[in-house]
Amino acid sequence: MDIWGITDRGVVREENQDAIGIEILTAQQMLAVVCDGMGGARAGRVASAMAMERFTEQFKAFHSQGGLSAAQMLEESVQCANEAVFHHAQTHSECYGMGTTLVAALADREQVDIVNVGDSRAYLVTAEGITRVTRDHSLVEDLVLRGELTAEEARFHPNKNLITRALGADEQVQADLFSLQVKPGSYLLLCSDGLSNVVSDQEILYEVIHGEQADTCCRRLLDIAIKRGAPDNVSVALIQC
């Protein structure tokens, strides 16, 4: 198993409001986190960094203590991160209204457990193809599910960045949880919408499976986004199971 990650402010934005975390918990167990902050320049950066750090800190504490399932550790860690961001927003006027997406994955050679809030994504990538595991909590995703937009139309919709769930927006947050059985050699890719809005699923599949070495994949995907103008911050984390 192995894990890599990269984050960049992109071409247009003045600062990076994304945050990523990658952790080698054991030789056979990896944790990756991607957060995409919102709420103004400084507040977005604070929200994403706080959520990533608090989530990772709490998850590692649960992991070392034992006794909880992977899903329970992910869910409880999200709630702890949400409480931290919400409390900070309520007690610091310059950060009022801030929030962040979060997608995280715990992976070993046989199973991947994923949690997400917002529109940062998780993909399972194998030689057989690419599957988006998570569902965006966004206005356009709801329109797609109702059949009012196609997936391709959603990529270019003017309201594609309007999300319906975020950490820090309320005292409690509803997160989605997923559990997958995987085969050795599978890949799990997490990303912010700065990547998924400009790089297609098939392009991600090509770079992960058919590109150069796996340890340069995150950099190659970032380079594609930058060549296309990267209007948003770009973050990618990749786990090789």
Image (cartoon, helix red, strand yellow):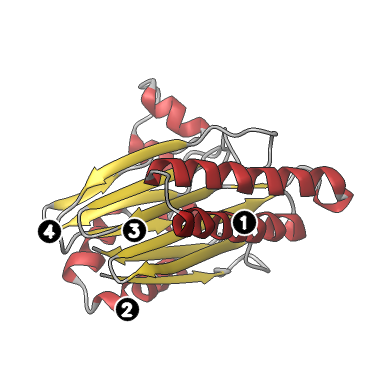
| Secondary structure at numbered mark 1 | helix
Where is residue 118? Give x, y as percent: 52, 41
As measured in the structure, the alpha-carbon distance from the residue carrying label 4 to the one carrying label 3 is: 14 Å
Q: Which kind of residue does numbered mark 2 sit on?
A: Thr
Q: Residue at coordinates 37% horizontally, 25% vertically from top-left?
A: 145
Query: In the picture shown, does residue 73 fall above or below 8?
Result: above
Q: Nearer the viewer, residue 147 or 40?
A: 40
Counting residues from the start of the chain, the first of labels 4 and 3 encountered is 4
Q: Say which mark, if any, is on residue 54.
A: 1
Where is residue 31? Give x, y as percent: 41, 61
Q: Nearer the viewer, residue 117 or 200?
A: 117
Counting residues from the start of the chain, the first of labels 2 and 4 encountered is 4
Q: Which residue is mark 3?
A: 189
Q: Residue at coordinates 38% horizontally, 43% vertically from top-left?
A: 69
Q: Which residue is mark 4?
A: 127
| Secondary structure at numbered mark 4 | loop
Q: Which residue is mark 2?
A: 216
Where is residue 18? Give x, y as percent: 58, 61
Q: Nearer the viewer, residue 190 or 153?
A: 190
| Secondary structure at numbered mark 3 | strand
